[in-house]
Amino acid sequence: MVAKTLFGFEEILAKEIRNLGGGNVVEGVRSVSFEGDTGFMYKANLCLRTAIKVLKPIHSFSVRDERELYKKIYAMDWTAFLSVSKTFAIDTTVKSDNFTHSLYVSQKAKDAIVDKFRDTEGARPSVDVKHPDIRINIHIQKDQCNISLDSSGRSLHQRGYRVATNIAPINEVLAAGLLLLSGWDGQCDFLDPMCGSGTMLIEAGMIACNIPANINRKEFAFEKWDDFDEELFEKIVDSALNKTREFYHKIVGYDKAPSAIRKANDNIESANLAEYITVERKNFFDTEKFTEKHLHMVFNPPYGERLDRSDLDSDFDIEAFYGDIGNTLKRQYPGTDAWFITSNLEALKYVGLRPSRKIKVFNSQLESKLVKYVMYAGSKRTKFQNKTED
């Protein structure tokens, strides 16, 4: 199988797959290949936090032009996966000099499949791009074509808990990946000081409690396959839920906007995490650390290229904003590991603190950095002196 992911998440996705029990795990670019049985395919869809799709390859061949593509797809035995009574859709990705338009490849593949059914069955299956019974994935890299069944259906970032959204909400897979990259494991208190509609808080809560990432989804594509084993799937769901754990710390979110607080609370309630997460209407720059213990902070500042300028205050000053982030961390948040993502790399200069780590990631199409600032309790010099004395 192949699990698709976002750039920069390949290593953590591979680790997730190994931890679930996948075999022969190999990292690619925005993908990880692995081996497993049918039950593991169900489990991967249910539990993987950083996967966007789980694909089951069914055929591969070399191809140089559209005629050869049509001929080789026509030659496949499609009755093993599809029937005239079922609907299908095709998603295509091309990275080839011979094929430059993914929609054209999808059209040629569709023609080959329906022509084969007409010639052998006397009738053809229909196309349904929105909610098909079978979703086929075609990937052409140079002259190599891989045909897969999409076992996920809608992208796995659509967890099913989000009932309300804010402006430019963070993708759930992106949020989970940032949390895992930051080392969040639920063993201390957590803060998202600019929480928006609550996605980071919810993903942090699900990681802390080891709740399956996609437990709230209404369906997966494999549930419409002829060989779907409902009893096996129910056993896997029960097994995953039996591995959840209790969380003994605090997960807190702040936001200035009343509308964001309402939306965050709605989403948290939808995710069944209200007992673990508290959301408060506060301006981060007017707050101080709520615990004397270590604090883990991950956030997605609401300003940057991902928002239209019309969404910003007319007097918004990006330099002052990032400066306020640095000052607040420095003065009010000792004993904190603070991580945030930004696509405004120039603005990082105004934080006024030296990041201890920078990790390249993508927020949608925007190249971004996940940066870490370690705020020591007391001065850094004192910390190291104490360590030396010990």
Image: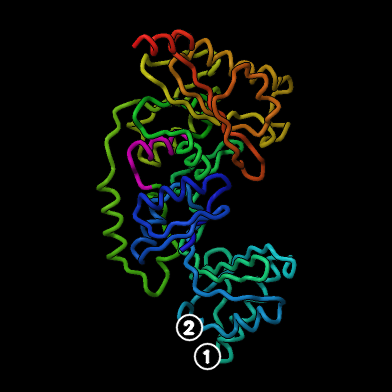
Q: Which residues are magenta?
A: 200-212
Image quarter hosting the C terminus? top left
Q: Is residue 214 left or right of residue 145?
A: left
- The verdict on residue 202 being magenta is yes
In x, y percent, where is residue 7?
Answer: 58, 47
Residue 250: image location, x then y, percent = 36, 25
Give how far across and how far down residue 132 sits, in percent: 52, 68
In the picture, measured across the screen, residue 219 lies left or right of residue 243, that is right
Disc 1 residue type? Glu
Residue placed most toward the observer, 3 or 299: 3
* Front residue of 329 and 382: 382
Q: Position of residue 169 (x, y in %)?
A: 57, 38
Q: Is residue 259 visible?
A: no
- Which is more foreground, mark 1 or mark 2? 2
Could you classify mark 2 by the number of other residues whose Cα lies within 10 Å: few (under 14), some (14-19), or many (20 or more)?
few
Could you say which disc has been placed on residue 121 in the image? Answer: 1
Residue at the spot 44% in from the left edge and 13% down from the top edge:
384
Q: Give yes or no for contact between labels 1 and 2 (Cβ–Cβ under 8 Å).
A: yes
Examine the rendering and report whether any part of residue 44 can be seen.
yes
Task: Give the prevailing secondary structure in the magenta stretch.
Answer: helix
Q: Which residue is mark 2?
A: 79
Q: How many marks?
A: 2
